[in-house]
Image: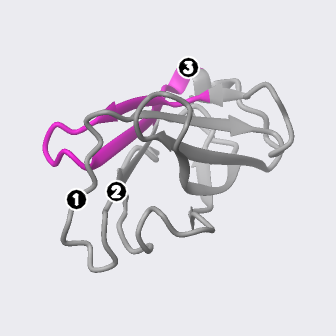
Amino acid sequence: MTSAVPFAVSTCGPIDLIPACHVPVTHWKGDSAVIKVLVWQDDAHTVPADLSTATITAMLKETNLDVTPVATFDVTVGPDPANEVTLYISPEVSRDLPMSKMVWDMQIDWFSDGVIITTAVDGTWQEKQDVTW
């Protein structure tokens, strides 16, 4: 079984709306995880967001109040389309994830300076025990 089939979060409103787009994830323990997020500048999803100066981070935590993440996603932006963000967790990392319900999010630091930061996507994360791994 693989849960690495990417899905794009493009049905949410523009990235400057609060709350963020909420995406609950159920994931097979020991499998890779790939999440693709399209970031738009407008409600109609016709103007791609400019991510050329942005730093994007994504983390998994047991609760949203925890300081230390359980895991961090590897993040890749673009190149085509340039507004596509790919979040990745390896099978090795996912084998060590707890079975309890967790939370995750992806933040965009628009100018990589810590001044303008947006949580674009968040959600819950639940591991399921895989039979083979």
Which mark, residue 39?
Answer: 2
Magenta residue span: 72-92
Asked whether, in this view, residue 6 is left or right of residue 128, the answer is left
Assign a secondary structure to mark 3: helix
State how far apart marks 2 and 3 are (Cα). 28 Å
Please check the rendered image and state whether residue 76 is part of the magenta-colored stretch, yes or no: yes
Give the residue displayed 28% in from the left and 48% down from the top: 84
Q: Nearer the viewer, residue 81 or 7?
A: 81
State how far apart marks 3 and 1 are (Cα). 33 Å
Q: Which residue is mark 3?
A: 92
Assign a secondary structure to mark 1: loop
N-terminal of the two: label 2 or label 1?
A: 2
Q: Quadrant of residue 12?
A: bottom left
Image marks 2 and 1: residues in contact by CB distance under 8 Å: yes
Q: Which residue is mark 1?
A: 48
The picture places residue 32, in percent across and down from the top left corner, at 47, 34
